[in-house]
Image: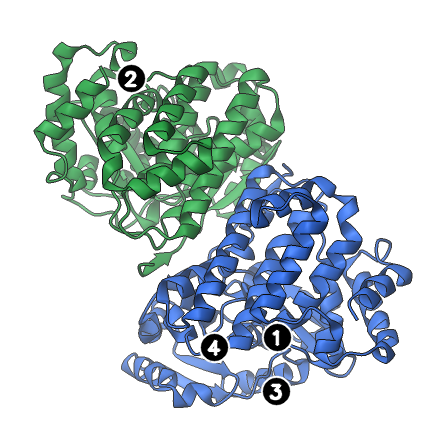
Chain colours: A green, B blue
Amino acid sequence: MDNFTFYNPTRVEFGTGKEQHIGQYLTEYGIKKVLLCYGSDRIKRDGLWAAIERSLAAHDIQLVEFGGIVSNPVISKVREAIAMARQYRVDAVLSVGGGSVLDSAKAIAAGTLYQGDVWDLFIGKGSIDASLPVFDILTLAATGSEMNSGAVVTNDATREKFAIHSVHSFPKVSIINPALMQTVSRDYLVYSAADIIAHAIEGYFTATVQPRFHSRMVEAIVATVIETTEILLDNPADYAARAEFAWAATQALNGLIYSGTSGFSYPNHMIEHALSALFNVPHGAGLSVVMPAWMRWYHTKNPAQFERFARTIFNRRTAEEGIAALEQWFDKIGTPTRLSQLGIAEADLPATIDNVLGNARYFGVAETYPRDVVTAILRSAL
Amino acid sequence: MDNFTFYNPTRVEFGTGKEQHIGQYLTEYGIKKVLLCYGSDRIKRDGLWAAIERSLAAHDIQLVEFGGIVSNPVISKVREAIAMARQYRVDAVLSVGGGSVLDSAKAIAAGTLYQGDVWDLFIGKGSIDASLPVFDILTLAATGSEMNSGAVVTNDATREKFAIHSVHSFPKVSIINPALMQTVSRDYLVYSAADIIAHAIEGYFTATVQPRFHSRMVEAIVATVIETTEILLDNPADYAARAEFAWAATQALNGLIYSGTSGFSYPNHMIEHALSALFNVPHGAGLSVVMPAWMRWYHTKNPAQFERFARTIFNRRTAEEGIAALEQWFDKIGTPTRLSQLGIAEADLPATIDNVLGNARYFGVAETYPRDVVTAILRSAL
């Protein structure tokens, strides 16, 4: 096992009704005025907004509203919010939504205290030395952002989908109420399943140091996601399954399964980020297309681990059978496995490949993923 | 899944050479003078002491020495250390050792800032409202104390082995260097294996709400402990196995596998604490005796989970076969499975039973564990 530091100070408040205590949690951290970030107005119709307003009012916390954050969130919107956070002198950012809102909130919180342009923080031109505290009420399980220090945002001018990471960006308190996720659409449920599996398996397959203990924990996550997704497709109101799905999502990207592993990379995310940056496809849908294609290209580089995956997750014998079983499972639950299902055609490949190559440089894996490799993987997914 | 709060702010510094940075870590938290707690003088002979002294000196941190903490640590010794911590006005407690030293350190750190007698904190007569910060260098993997907020100490006057729990008692920084554990004796390695397995399975078998995700994580821990113990018995210098063993120990009791479970109790610990409080047997050795006996009494109350354990861990079919396989494995690695191996005879049972019944009241499970049940379990372990 490699040397590592594990530090994750996020406090998770998990369960039914926890969002009703948001005012109390903010008060514990001395917060008096929050920038409340959200996406669509749906939260105003379903009672969540009213619950938040009530709790904030009960604790004399002022609310500055910033809505309209879209999936695959963009840096122009983050800049707008930073201007607002400064204008109103908020002392915290509260995200209400899924990963797009939360990642934006982290960028807003760091960017508000940064002197230059916030995109600097994504491209290494500036560093995050401080951040407004971030709080969140999660309405979609997948991102993992609720218990980590990262955030991914797209630059809408350059079509680059890049990330920040900072110890200052851990949420102070994350509220995960699985009951709030019951209304997630069938499509977003299966995209989320693909996203969580992708978070879990990137290191599992690519790490040069991958302890068996860590492989077992990854398998616990993947098996749980598969099992609970099937339950939820049958019965979206199954709270127990929704809760396991959500907590597995958190564990997939809170540092635990990567602690002490090394040499890993995020090739599926690297390729997918091009799809969502260029074609605005849902991140999870892009990932379910990329994963089988990438696996078929990669598996001979780590055959024992792919055989292990086939055996432990799908009770199959060979690496190829395991990959086929995953692809069939994606087909069965209804998340795409072909670029054509995303509306991406052969003619779109050159621009996509260029974007992936940019990401490969950004991820530091340009040598492993030259043009011919990226082309082969994407062509096989047409 | 039940509602829960997950909050674990301990920073773990894991890997080779990390102890050489103890001065730096203390400095990051503004520490100028530490009470250095330890057990035997062994650490002065093997180079660890010198490394610590060097690092503290390099950061101008004063050291007040408090040695002689024994396994199954006692409250009288904790009181001595509290007097010293006050006299020298230390601003942190540094534990160098295993669980006994670390649990003592937590009690010392809390007790130093508590006005009354420290045992009050163990029996609910006082509450922990503050604590000196605790840091530790772990030399034995088993306790889990390095990443949780609990501590177990024995009252040497009353022979009660009780616990404290407080959000103020999480270590600030825990240093886990598996290489420091290479010199652990064969006996203590196998006792530790039993201890970790006990931590993992208490909730697994007794929780009334036990999500499958959590069961899978428990199984990941137990399988890893079994696998790595066997490797280490063959080759104590196997760093990779030592590291997985240590990290699995930490995960077994840092809150993760209990998050969202409910209705669980710690019957094996409850019974074992009587053995170590009365007869000073090593905690893990006591647990490997208690576990198979308790399981044979309990398994019919949760048959599906015991069958699951038999199948996933030992590839056996029935609950009884799974229990027998665990007992055989304890025999194989050389940790005791009979009270007689601990030097405890039939004549010792009455006092033992009385002590267990006291623990049952303390653990709040007196109704489930009346005298006849405790007697039956202990007699079956003779």
* Quadrant the N terminus of chain A occupies: bottom left
Q: CA distance from mark 4 to mark 1?
A: 30 Å
Q: Position of residue A187 (x, y in %)?
A: 43, 15
| Amino acid, disc 2 | Val
Tag shown at residue A281: 2
Report, in whole angstroms, how far the alpha carbon at label 2 lies from the one at label 3: 65 Å
Q: Chain of mark 1?
A: B
Whole-percent x, y for residue A245 in the image:
51, 31
Q: Which mark is first along the chain, 3 or 1?
A: 3
Closest to the camera, between mark 2 and mark 3, is 2
Q: Are marks 4 and 3 in contact (CB under 8 Å)?
A: no
Q: Position of residue B36 (x, y in %)?
A: 46, 82
Q: Position of residue A37 (x, y in %)?
A: 39, 28
Amino acid on which disc 1 is placed: Gly
**Residue A286 quadrant:** top left
**Pointer 1 and pointer 3 on the same chain:** yes
Under mark 3, the amino acid is: Glu
Q: Nearer the viewer, mark 4 or mark 3?
A: 4
Question: Is residue B316 in view?
Answer: yes
Which residue is situated farthest in the right direction here? B372
Q: Secondary structure at mark 1?
A: helix
